[in-house]
Image (tube, grey):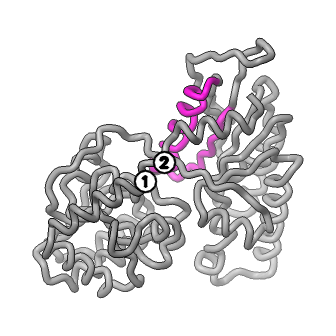
Amino acid sequence: MTTVETSTAISVGRSGKHQRVAVLAVDSSSGEIGGAERFYVGLRNAIIRAGSDAEIVWFTSNEVDCDAVKESYLRCYDLSLATFDGVISTKAPGYVVRHRNHICYLQHTMRAFYDMFDAEFPWANEKLREQRHLIHMMDTAALKPPHTRRLFVISHEVQQRLRAFNGLPSEVLYQASTLSGFHTGEYRYLFLPGRLHRWKRVGLVIEAMHHIRSPVELLISGTGEDAAHFRMMAAGNSSICFLGHVDDRTLLDLYSNALAVAVVPLHEDFGLVTLEAFLSGKPVITCEDSGEPARLVKDGRSGYVCPPKPEAIAERIDRLAKSPEHAAQMGRHGMESIRHISWDEVGEKLVTALGF
């Protein structure tokens, strides 16, 4: 079942016909609203500003087990988007859709069957490994020509993963934030926003709080599957506060008054939090194996890239707590480093790739 979110913008192409672009958005039914969901809105609006009518088409994908995954691939393969002049897919299984003018702006493949397979399925039997191989084969076939005319990815991390697992080349095109109104306030606490999921490694920062020597609080916003586990880890530590879901205005204020922002996931695809921290003039503490955040952060200049160990994270927190002036200087460097990233560039490149 799909639902279509329509836009009121209309554009006319060289042929005199309206150019209608479908942004195929996948809902995996996790119940969480995060960077991926805001990504679709930013992408749609960028396509409209670039001169084409754009609509978000939602496709529900069931990822509860391998049989459900295969069923979702088949349903997406049979999805008819023939009334659109172009289709932009963004993630699995959306890119298996059949269309004469299909490009992909890939967020990620199903990571549980790629780089996180051994961690998620340490008990995997031969049947599950065969199913994983089948998913790799379907993805490879779907993401290369002629099925997909052009393949863009949101980060170097995703680019390397595609090359390693699927043998496919791609072009990196950074997304921007859909939030506006960023501002810089005081430098008071460590802030950790986002989905509370084990891959985000919130526990690393919670453990780090047991090692810091400075009187710094840790504020954690967001919800997720592993929220209860992380709350148990933090039990008894009065310096750690869980805020739950916060609205955009509150999120902007939380960024603005942070001493620094912690972004310590494992092999993160992109890490929108890093951009939003920089837009707020805040340094970012990340880890060497955190994926794209470790590429965006320049160690010692716009934040710290440290080993994924609580003691190392705590040491960086203490450094910043001792010198808020240094934190402010790092934040300014971070802000300058991402000025070139914009949704307008994304929209223009994708509309051009569609031939409009």
Name the residue nearer the viewer: 225 or 305.
305
Magenta part of the protein: which range? 22-51
Q: Where is residue 352 in the image (x, y as percent from the top left)?
A: 71, 35
| Amino acid beneath label 1 | Ile
The residue shown at (81%, 35%) is 101
CA distance separating discs 1 and 2: 6 Å
Quadrant of residue 242 within the rendered picture = bottom left
Q: Position of residue 178 (x, y in %)?
A: 43, 40
Q: Where is residue 122 in the image (x, y as percent from the top left)?
A: 63, 83
Check if residue 189 falls in the magenta segment: no
Q: Relative to residue 29, is residue 307 depicted above or below?
A: below
Q: Relative to residue 226, is residue 245 depicted above or below?
A: above
Q: Position of residue 281 (x, y in %)?
A: 27, 54
Mark 2 highlights which residue? 341
Q: Relative to residue 267, is residue 45 depicted above or below?
A: above
Mark 1 highlights which residue? 338
Whether residue 191 is visible, yes or no, is yes
Give the SS element for disc 2. Answer: loop
Residue 322 is left or right of residue 152, and the answer is left
Quadrant of residue 301 within the rendered picture = bottom left
Residue 48 is left or right of residue 163, and the answer is left
Q: Going by the picture, which residue comes out furthest to the right? A: 146
The residue shown at (67%, 59%) is 109
Quarter of the figure that contains the N terminus: top right
The residue shown at (67%, 39%) is 350
